[in-house]
Amino acid sequence: MIDLNEIEIGYKKRLFSIESIQLLKGKVYSLIGANGAGKTTFLRSLQGNIAPIKGQILINNTEVKFFDRVKLSQTIAFVNSKFDGVDYLRVSDYVGLGRTPYTNALGRLSEIDLKIVENSLTELNIKHLSNYFTTKLSDGERQLAAIARAISQETDIIILDEPTAFLDYANRKLVMKEMRKIATDLQKCIIISSHDLDLCIESETEILVINKKTKTLDHFIANSLSKEKLIEIGF
Amino acid sequence: MTVARKNKFILLSLVLLFPIVCGLHLFAGEISVSFSDFWNSLLNFNTDNTSQTIIREFRIPRLTMGILAGGGLSIAGLFMQTMFNNPLAGPYILGINSGSSLFVAFSVMTGIPFLTSNIGTISSALIGAFIFGLIILSFSYLVKSHISLLLIGIMLGSFTSAIVSILQTMSEPNQLKLFTMWTMGSLQQVEFTELPLIILFFIVGISLSLFMIKPLNALVIGESQALTLGIHVKYVRLALISITAILTGIITAYCGPIAFVGLAVPNIVKMIFKTQSHLTLLIGCFLIGSFFMLICDILIQLLESTIHIPINALTSIIGAPFVIIIVLKRLA
């Protein structure tokens, strides 16, 4: 899916390097690292917004910098740490925006698009909210809606930037559970940046940690790392 | 009834109401005219017939300008509000009108025949609106706060009106009178023969708007999110500024600055339709914007025998309190 070989990540100055990591479909990766270690820069590099200092980021064997904007939006969906909701924007219309990369110049949703929107809502168990205004949801529900929007975008990759930062414990657990379910059910490659070490370990995700000493990105498979060890490497 | 159906129903009712409001406006003036005069003035115009002349030379241009000014400014306001993610944005408050005013003032006062001609005035108005649109756009990258951007717009407005008043002191009496009349705003400055050109500009502006619906819908959730949905935000912003310049520029050139319509109407439309679908909002803004303008103008015509209210004064009297209401509602 995503091939990272001999890459140096950074913007103006080098932040860390990647020897050889393959990110696969069907898995959830937690991206861990200290503030300023380069998590955001890495996520932006994956989306083709920042070119790596050295090496090429390959998605499905094509270098990401050759993707045009529409192709990119059909390959990678992005979820922010917070969506505040918009006046008069209903959940169904919001999730429908995920179809933007596929609609014609006038942006009209077809029957198929509407079906995909409905399925995304069902996948996250928020179909009953589809007529609600996004401003009227709880923080947790809004984050689920944002994830539903990313699913309706039908991309192989979903990147989430600290999606649980503003959620309470129950909702954090719920979001991680849903992400694992989506990765397996829909065969997506999901990358989540997070500061919540306990949650990442508990949710049995793969771990990508920016090693503080060696300045490399290290990959650990699920359940192979204790919290103490993770702290030692990353912080 | 689903939301989409309910909104279709409201739109349809507004469309049906449209000819009625137009009719009211057409026959509201002090001198009463008949319906047959209206058709004759269009289809077989007789220059000796006073009623027909009144309709053709005064009423029809005034009606057309009312529709276009109300509808056009409201659509421009909708664009600005979505683009800057700011419910208090509008072409007037952001100073885009002032760009037109300044350039029109310059071109009128130069006295150069080309610049004072119709096409010269329109061009100056469009260029002025576009340049001031670009200025506001570049400021929007620098200032993060919504209020700051509005303040910059208001300052642009004050700045240009200062320059315009200096220009006025230097101009000849008849130019001065013309220009002072223009700054009060009027729907009656246009002649029948000028209408086709103005309508043509409008059709271009509105047709381009249709291609903005998809990016506008995505821009609702913010610029960075729109980018990840495959929208070319940079080009879209330029396109939106250009269309706003066309719509605002041409209205400002012919009707003078008209305040608050572009700010108030999109907010009213959103309250009525309760949606962020920009196709619905666009049609809604056009219809309700022109209703708003025509009803204001009917009021002006009814009061004309007692008091003469400039259109810009009336829209401000209604619009300014409305803005305060929006601000209070946001704070609550």
Image (spheres, coloured by chain):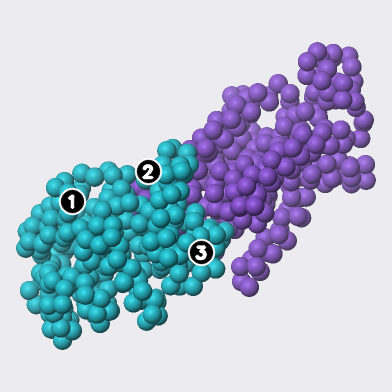
- In this rendering, position of residue B168 left or right of residue A228: right
Few, some or many C-alpha atoms within 10 Å of disc 1 (few <14, some 14-19, many ≥20)?
A: many
**Image height of B179 relative to A83, above or below:** above
Q: Count residues near mark 3 (Cα–Cα under 10 Å), then give few for <14, some for 14-19, many for 20+.
A: few
> Which amino acid type is marked by label 3?
His
**Mark 1 touches mark 3? (CB < 8 Å):** no
Residue under the point 44% across and 54% down: A118
In the rendered structure, the residue with mark 1 lies on which chain?
A: A
Which of these two is toward me, B7 or B281?
A: B7
Q: Is residue B146 visible?
A: no
Image mark for residue A128: 3
Q: Quadrant of residue B100?
A: top right
Of residue B143 and residue B201, the one placed in the foreground of this image is B201
In the displayed structure, does residue A215 sit left or right of residue B319?
Answer: left
Q: Residues within 10 Å of mark 2 (few under 14, many from 20)?
A: some
Q: Is residue B212 above or below residue A41?
A: above
Q: Secondary structure at mark 1?
A: strand
Both on one chain, marks 2 and 1?
yes
Which residue is pictured at 39% across the width and 76% down the height? Answer: A171
Give the label on residue A59, or none. Answer: 1
The residue where tag 2 is placed is A102
Percent coordinates x, y for residue A154 in the rendering: 33, 51
Lateral position of residue B107 relative to residue B50, left or right: left
CA separation, marks 2 and 1? 20 Å
The amino acid type found where label 2 is placed reads Tyr
What is chain A's hue in the picture?
A: cyan
Q: Earlier in the sequence, mark 3 or mark 2?
A: 2
Single out the mark in the foreground, 3 or 2: 3
Residue shown at 26% from the left, 62% from the top = A183
Q: Tell me which numbered mark, 2 or 1, is placed earlier along the sequence.
A: 1
Q: Are marks 3 and 2 in contact (CB under 8 Å)?
A: no
